[in-house]
Image (cartoon, rainbow, N blue to C red):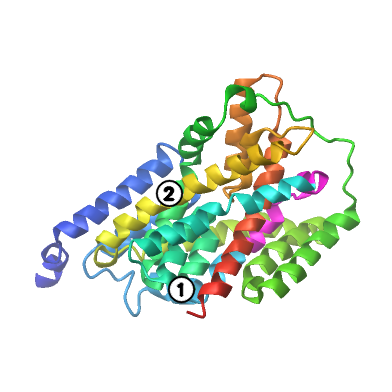
Amino acid sequence: MDQLMIGFLGLSWKHFVMFGIGFLLIYLAIAKEYEPVLLLPIGFGALLCNIPFSSAVGPEGPLTILHHAGIVTELFPCLIFVAVGAMCDFSPMLKNPVLMLFGAAAQFGIFATIIFAAFLGFDIKEAASIGIIGAADGPTTIYVATKLAPELLAPLSVAAYSYMSLVPIIQPPVIKALTTKKERSILMPVKEDVPVSRMVRILFPIAVTLIAGIIAPISVALVGMLMFGNLIKECGVVERLSRASQEELANLVTLLLGITIGATMTAEQFLNVKTIMVMGMGIIAFVFDTAGGVLFAKGLNLFLKEKINPMIGACGISAFPMSARVIAKMALAENKRNYIIMHAVGANVSGQLGSIIAGGLVLAIVAGF
């Protein structure tokens, strides 16, 4: 009889709070469709790990084994990037190379948040891990956190994926606060007449891997896997591998990654002041990233004859393709003839690349401390 009651006897108010958080994530995934492929398994994983004496976690628990095999080793984030690379089309960015600048400018939030977190008392490795939330890139956040601040992995992961799903809510107010209606209505014609040859599309991932790898060798695992996935897609001779990367690999690793991250959300590790501060600074990082991209675009317009719609700058974050869709809808709302989706996508894929390089640079600088 004691064995039948052990679960009830082990319950505390903290477990019920975590059950509530798990239910909230599941609700957001199902009812609101906020990043459902990630928030649903994360939410359910939070339920599994907070049941007292759960067999899903612990030395022999399958989710703990998956955590050590896929998260601690950084295997899952790297495999996710193979899938993401196979889904990315860098052609819009290559047609208009100036869009690459926004992938760098919109990483401002990372470094601003690192400084802010350090000011609040976090050590440099924790501050760097918190700042990476601003990359709007879940796998990069997980990869950096695993190396620098594994004790913050759960709140960092939840913050990164939760705020990615809230891009349609977070970005528009920031953009409107920094731009005028006239600026948001700037027309940007699509450069259909600029071809991108197959050779360029093949050489691009190889060149990026070599350049980024030589500058920041610690980024090779992330950049290399992203570019390898893209090379599989662009080379045109391994269509089966490209489809498998975009579908089976993406689905399987996302499923395992989500439920494994959720299983780290134990009451003991999650319910503390640090978690609240991390979640708060995650919003700050997203806001600074969006603002940095928009302000950079406005500054660039001072020197350009053909003006850029400053909303494009906000697409420099890595929330692909959600940010591009949000900005494209905002542009149409301001001017029904303003179809900037291709420009937005170009800036967005550059943000995908920029966030990984920024993560590599942060690791290269901070890992030695």
Depth check, front residue: 144 or 8: 144
Residue 295, quarter of the rendered image: top right
| 82 magenta-colored | yes
Mark 2 falls on what kind of element?
A: helix
Residue under the image location 64 percent in, 35 percent down: 310
Report if residue 260 is visible in the image.
Answer: no
Q: Amino acid at mark 2?
A: Ile
Q: Quadrant of the N terminus?
A: bottom left
> Residue 109: x and y, percent?
51, 52
Can you say whether 95 is above or below 41 in the image? Answer: above
Q: Amino acid at mark 1?
A: Leu
Give the spatial CA distance, label 2 vs label 1.
Answer: 20 Å
Residue denoted by label 2: 284
> Residue 60: x and y, percent?
35, 79
Mark 1 falls on what kind of element?
A: helix
Residue under the image location 19 percent in, 59 percent down: 14
Q: Nearer the viewer, mark 2 or mark 1?
A: 2
Q: Residues within 10 Å of mark 1 (few under 14, many from 20)?
A: many
Q: Is residue 274 left or right of residue 106?
A: left
Depth check, front residue: 157 or 256: 157
Q: Is residue 272 left or right of residue 335?
A: left
Q: Residues within 10 Å of mark 2 (few under 14, many from 20)?
A: many
Numbered label tally: 2
> Residue 338: x and y, percent?
70, 24
Q: Which residues are magenta?
A: 81-96
Q: Earlier in the sequence, mark 2 or mark 1?
A: 1
Residue denoted by label 1: 148
Can you say whether 268 is above or below 346 in the image? Answer: below
State the mark number for residue 35.
Answer: none
In the picture as drawn, the residue positioned furthest to the front comes out as 302
Instruction: Please tell me whether the stretch drawn in magenta is mainly helix, strand or loop.
Output: helix
